[in-house]
Image: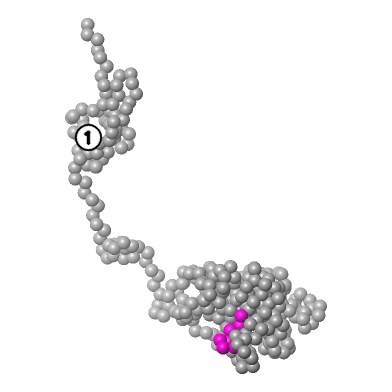
Amino acid sequence: MTKKVAKVQIIVTDEQGRQVPFNTKTLTKEFQNKAGKKYKVAIEEPGKSRIDIGEYIVQGSVNPPPPPECPPGQHKDPNGNCVPDEVPHECPSGQHWDEQQQKCVDDVVEPPTGTLLYDSNTDINWDAITGTSQVVTDVYGEFKPNGKYFRMKASGSPKMILMKDTKELLLEHGGKYGRAYFGVCNYASRLEAEFKLTDASHNASFKTRNRHQFADVQSGAPDNKRQGGQGSSFAVDKVDADLEVVHGTEISGPSKSLSPKLEVNKYYKMRFSQYDKNGKIHVVDELDRGNGFEVVNEGDVNAPNQFFNKAEFEQWSEFWVRANMDNGGRMYFKNIKMYAL
């Protein structure tokens, strides 16, 4: 009797791991309409481990995908027209879509009406400066209500350098929060200025409706008479409006990210308005990057009652310009103007 000899097996496996019997009829049927499909081929001898010997790709013409019918970034709408993948927001004539506010805004924001209270171009006596500049470390002008003075305060021994030819105000200090208080009584107001940051970590801070330093006028004045003021600050990537109730106590207001970010060593124009609205202080921050003003931050601040005593602010108040710089430095300002609203 002839002993039956175990056979060598040839094993074919498809891309899903399914084993396909190895014979000509079976494979012929398997390979139909499978051009480009891959199959693994292995050999297994009796009593030995399976050995993979390679991969077979079914031959035939593989049709490449048809070329796109629309340019990249577009697709066909139901009418067969190529349209952008992201449909832009449509706004009326004279307006554009603002991503930060998620609404249509005017291309150019017309300045609100107001009475001019202060202008650094005329209320500083530039002609009286001898040489190219003047350094102020204490008080410029007469310290009295509505005196249109400015005075240097806070950490880092701040000083203001007045540049005669350009009418720039260069605020320098070696601390964190050096500032200049301007002697202009104000309640509802719009503060305008141009500012230039010299480091991406700095921000320019402005504060109005401000009686922060009233104790310099009335010693021992209570907290509710030393209203810190409504402020807005401009960093390279953010605008932030907060209310300082009294020194060190703040109420957060509206804030927005800036995109694109502001560049350092470049002047930007800003307008910061604040006025009463429905029992709160309404803040509007505008920025001009060179193509006209746009609203970049807006909202309400729930201020305590002492911020609505208009007579107090008209009797004595100031506004400030502050350079927030953790390690000190220099910040540039010009064309500082204050309007009553």
Count of marks overlaid on the render: 1
Q: Residue at x 25, y 19 (%)?
A: 7
Q: Is residue 338 visible in this depiction of the protein?
A: no
SS label for mark 1: helix
Mark 1 residue crowding within 10 angstroms, few (<14) / some (14–19) / many (20+): some
Above or below — where is 176 with respect to 5?
below
Q: What residue is disc 1 on?
A: 30
- Given residues 112 and 266, the one toward you in this image is 266
Occupied quadrant, residue 209: bottom right
The image position of residue 87, as x and y in percent, is 37, 66
Occupied quadrant, residue 1: top left
Above or below — where is 15 with respect to 133?
above
Q: Is residue 90 visible in this depiction of the protein?
A: yes
- Given residues 214 and 274, the one toward you in this image is 214
Question: Magenta residues, as a range?
Answer: 164-170
Question: Residue 168 in magenta?
Answer: yes
- Given residues 122 and 302, the one toward you in this image is 122
Residue furthest out toward the bottom: 127
The image position of residue 275, as x and y in percent, is 61, 80
- Given residues 304 and 316, the one toward you in this image is 316
Residue furthest out toward the front: 131
The image position of residue 35, as x and y in percent, is 22, 42
Q: Residue at x 60, y 87 (%)?
A: 132
The image position of residue 140, as x and y in percent, is 69, 87
Q: Label 1 is placed on what type of residue?
A: Glu
Quadrant where the C terminus lies? bottom right
Q: Is residue 119 left or right of residue 89?
A: right
Q: Residue at x 70, y 89 (%)?
A: 141
Occupied quadrant, residue 238: bottom right
Residue furthest out toward the right: 220
User: Looking at the image, what colour scheme do you see?
Assistant: one colour
Question: Residue 151 in magenta?
Answer: no
